[in-house]
Amino acid sequence: MKNRGLMTRLKNAFAGIQHTWRGERSFRTQVGIALAALSFFAWWGLPAYWWGMIVLVIALALAAELMNSGIEALADHLHPEHHPAIGKIKDMTAGTVLIMSTRL
């Protein structure tokens, strides 16, 4: 997969987002919350510099959710049975998403 062209890399990235959208309810929830927040802030009429910060925080929260979903999928694939260490890793990545999501 290394050294692929830009279009191939973009296609793969969008495919990853699409897989996450289809398979992860938490990602869809995060997107819904992001849209609600954007709607609220649009109604509130914030200045432009706030929009940059809001969009950045939303992008970081969604990126954290994508990373969390990827790590969970990999852990489940490599070790399908319950394992305490994998459970801790999943909890840690879920905590990352929680912290990123509450920054808004």
Image: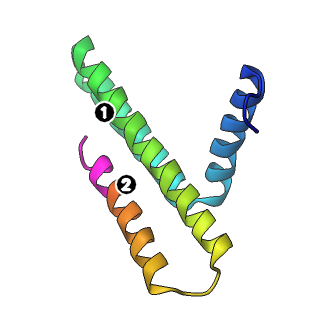
The residue labelled by disc 1 is 40
Crowding at label 2, few (<14), some or many (≥20) Cα neighbours within 10 Å?
many
Highlighted range, magenta: 98-104
Asked whether, in this view, residue 17 is left or right of residue 4, the answer is: left
Measured from the top left, where is residue 32 in percent x and y? 46, 46
Callout 2, which amino acid?
Val
Residue 97's place in the image compared with 3, above or below, is below
Single out the residue that lies furthest toward the top. Answer: 48
Task: Identify the image quadrant of residue 58.
Answer: top left
Asked if the magenta segment contains residue 99, the reply would be yes
**Camera-side residue: 18 or 3?**
3
Measured from the top left, where is residue 35 in percent x and y? 43, 37
Asked whether, in this view, residue 68 is left or right of residue 92, the answer is: right
The residue labelled by disc 2 is 97
Inter-mark Cα distance, 2 to 1: 22 Å
Callout 1, which amino acid?
Phe
**Camera-side residue: 38 or 71?**
71
**Between disc 2 and disc 1, whose residue precedes?**
1
Q: In which quarter of the image is the N terminus?
A: top right
Q: Are marks 2 and 1 in contact (CB under 8 Å)?
A: no
Q: Quadrant of the C terminus?
A: top left
